[in-house]
Image (cartoon, grey):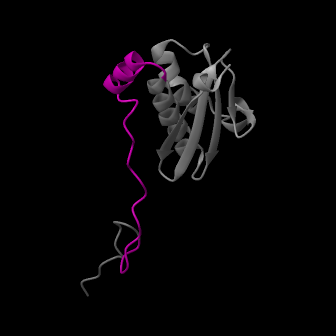
Amino acid sequence: MTKEDVYAAVGKRKTSIARVRIMPGKGNIQVNKRDILEHFKRDTLKSLILKPLDFLEVSGNYDIIARVNGGGLSGQAGAMRLGISRALAKVDEEYRVKLRKEKYLTRDARKVERKKYGQKGARKRFQFSKR
């Protein structure tokens, strides 16, 4: 395996950042130097991460090494999905077209809205009393 066979990309979601490298292999996935099942225990998160690979039907063809930090598990899973999608788009131009059509290359920009002063939360107000 040469350096040309390794494709790297960065994915972000909420406050999580995932640095993903994919290379031809047997389908092994490592997250923070651990197996994916050790890091993401919920099957829903694992399936979310693997969606772009399953969509392109290449799930057993690539090994994935990811460094994930920040946020919670859901945000990290979303960041990994975007990172994997971006790396696959670099592998083949045909993959890019398919992934773009299914919106796997679109960054989910939603973040937690900040709390405002004079209010209980971002939108919630303190109870109003007329008298």
Is residue 105 highlighted in magenta? yes
Q: Quadrant of residue 20?
A: top right
Q: How many numbered discs sit on the rendered protein?
A: 0
- From the viewer's perspective, tell me whether residue 36 is left or right of residue 97: right
Of all residues, the one furthest to the left in this rendering is: 130
Q: Quadrant of residue 21?
A: top right
- From the viewer's perspective, tell me whether residue 46 is left or right of residue 114: right
Residue 112 drawn at (x, y percent): 43, 58
Q: Residue at 39% x, 41% y: name it.
A: 107
Assign the N terminus to one quadrant of the image: top right
- Quick check: 16 above or below 79? below
Q: Residue at 53% x, 45% y: name it.
A: 75
Q: Residue at 63% x, 36% y: name it.
A: 66
Residue 86 drawn at (x, y percent): 46, 31
Q: What range is drawn magenta here? A: 91-120
Assign the C terminus to one quadrant of the image: bottom left
Q: Would you say the magenta stretch is mainly helix, strand or loop? A: loop
Residue 108 or 84: which is nearer the viewer? 84
Is residue 68 highlighted in magenta? no
Residue 98 drawn at (x, y percent): 36, 19
Q: Quadrant of residue 29?
A: top right
- Quick check: 81 above or below 27? below
Of all residues, the one furthest to the bottom in this rendering is: 131
Residue 128 or 3: which is nearer the viewer? 3
Q: Residue at 75% x, 35% y: name it.
A: 34
- Quick check: 109 above or below 131? above
Residue 118 or 83: which is nearer the viewer? 83
- From the viewer's perspective, tell me whether residue 128 is left or right of residue 42: left
Residue 17 or 123: which is nearer the viewer? 17
